[in-house]
Amino acid sequence: MLSTTDLLSKANKNLWIKMIFYFLLHASACLVLFLVPHEEMVSLVLNYIFIGLSGLLLGFNVSHDALHGAFSKNKTVNNWLYHLSFNIQGTNAYLWKVRHTASHHIFPNVDGCDADIDENPLIRLSPQHPLRKYQQ
């Protein structure tokens, strides 16, 4: 049976492996966009979808945890990872932090106040949001 210390050590190693994987995944998707000729529109659209999905994985698994100081015990490492992982995607890390802190942390999951759950065209995150045909 693993001790708590062993579990934390293993979890920490897996977290770093996952972070490296998501950075490489996103970087490779961006490189493919510029280095591989897209003869057909379908390949270009699929590449953009892949960039978006890899960016989401990077954002949820690295950026958000680093912003909240949960990625590393070192505050400088968290800050560096947060800014790097957001800014390489074209999202301004400073502005996202201000928006996230000013709306989500003050009014978590409050409809109309939390910008993170306000109307989303794809996902219905609140019973007050309109129910679209494809969400039924």
Image: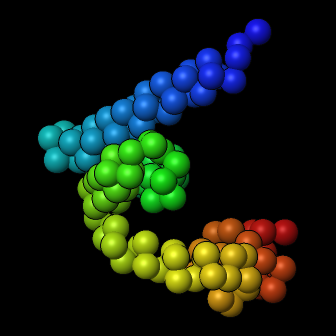
| Residue under the point 51% across and 58% down | 68
Question: How many numbered marks, from 0 up?
Answer: 0
From this viewpoint, is residue 15 visible? yes
Q: Horizontal and vertical percent for residue 50?
A: 41, 47
From this viewpoint, is residue 51 visible? no
| Residue under the point 45% across and 59% down | 67
Q: Horizontal and vertical percent for residue 134?
A: 75, 69
Quadrant that contains the C terminus: bottom right
Name the residue at the top extreme: 1
- 106 over 96 or under it: above or below: below
| Residue under the point 48% across and 53% down | 69
Q: Quadrant of residue 135?
A: bottom right
- Residue 67 in the figure: left or right of residue 93: right
- 80 over 94 or under it: above or below: above
Q: Horizontal and vertical percent for residue 98?
A: 43, 79
Q: Quadrant of residue 11?
A: top right
- 31 over 84 or under it: above or below: above
- Residue 79 in the figure: left or right of residue 62: left
- 135 over 63 or under it: above or below: below
Front one among 135 and 77: 77
Q: Quadrant of residue 32?
A: top left
Q: Horizontal and vertical percent for residue 65?
A: 51, 52
Quadrant that contains the N terminus: top right
| Residue under the point 42% across and 37% down | 19
The colour scheme applied to this rendered structure is rainbow
Front one among 115 and 9: 9
